[in-house]
Image (spheres, rainbow, N blue to C red):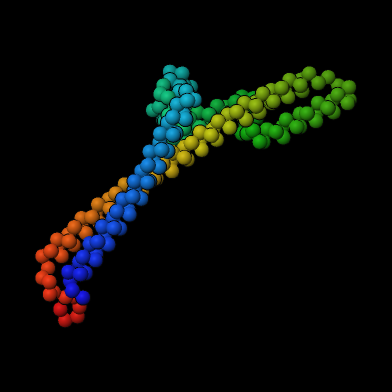
Amino acid sequence: MKRRTLDLAFSIGGLLFGALILVLGLVLQNQANFAETYVKDQLGQQQIEFTAVDYLHGEQDDAPCLVEFAGTPLDSGKKSECYANEYIAYHLATGATEAGYEGTTYATIGAVQRGLGAEIQAAKDAGKDTTELDASLTSVNTLRETMFKGETLRGLLLTTYGFSIFGERAALAATICFIAAALLVILSLAGLIHFKVTPVDKVVGLGH
């Protein structure tokens, strides 16, 4: 096979493949931009703001991000993760501990709720006073409702964080595609230059 033919084939193939990778990179970058903009816009509508440093108590002890983002709006995936895992989770755990049910969650405190309900019914059947039990049940009901709201918001924020991570990965993949496309174009142009300077009668193969 003539060397010029081989150079031309590889150069054209490289340019076509480079164009394909470039298109893929543009698509990935578009999706990355969409994810970033969508997350920021949706979070912005909630108008959530991180507590100022002066008003933080025990939340910041093991959460530097709460200090870093203090006083700023919650408008990114990274901030969503911080707010969900460090702020909301802290207050849910603290609330449960202060109520006397350390380590419980919305799901597990349901058993406590049902148990108190059964105790109240048994006390009523026995003609006993249920004032204290009623107060405990009211406290547990309030705690469980708070946990439901807090854990729901926490889950939504972590889902937002996960969505933002997909956007970041898409942006990284787009950058890799752009670099690969640029390299292919450079190599293909080098091949075309070699095609131009190679003698017409030069061939490739054994003995040449």
Q: Nearer the viewer, residue 196 or 28?
A: 196
Where, by quadrant of the figure, is residue 11 drawn?
bottom left
Q: Is residue 116 left or right of residue 107?
A: right
Q: Nearer the viewer, residue 16 or 185?
A: 16
Indicate the position of residue 22 as horizontal and vertical percent values: 31, 50
Indicate the position of residue 163 as horizontal and vertical percent values: 46, 40
Which quarter of the image is occupied by the C terminus?
Answer: bottom left
Which quarter of the image is occupied by the N terminus?
Answer: bottom left
Q: Is residue 202 visible?
A: yes
Which residue lies at the image location 55% right of the left edge and 30% below the top edge? 153
Q: Nearer the viewer, residue 44 or 71?
A: 44
Q: Is residue 180 visible?
A: no
Which residue lies at the image location 66% right of the left edge and 28% below the top edge? 144
Indicate the position of residue 126 as horizontal and vertical percent values: 89, 25
Q: Nearer the viewer, residue 6 or 163?
A: 6
Which residue lies at the image location 15% right of the left edge and 65% below the top edge? 195
Where, by quadrant of the figure, is residue 128 drawn?
top right
Q: Is residue 122 left or right of residue 16?
A: right
Indicate the position of residue 5 as horizontal and vertical percent values: 20, 69
Q: Farthest residue to the right: give it.
A: 126
Q: Is residue 50 left or right of residue 195?
A: right
Looking at the image, is 157 positioned above or below residue 50? below
Looking at the image, is 198 positioned above or below residue 164? below
Which residue lies at the image location 14% right of the left edge and 61% below the top edge? 193
Count of marks placed on residues:
0
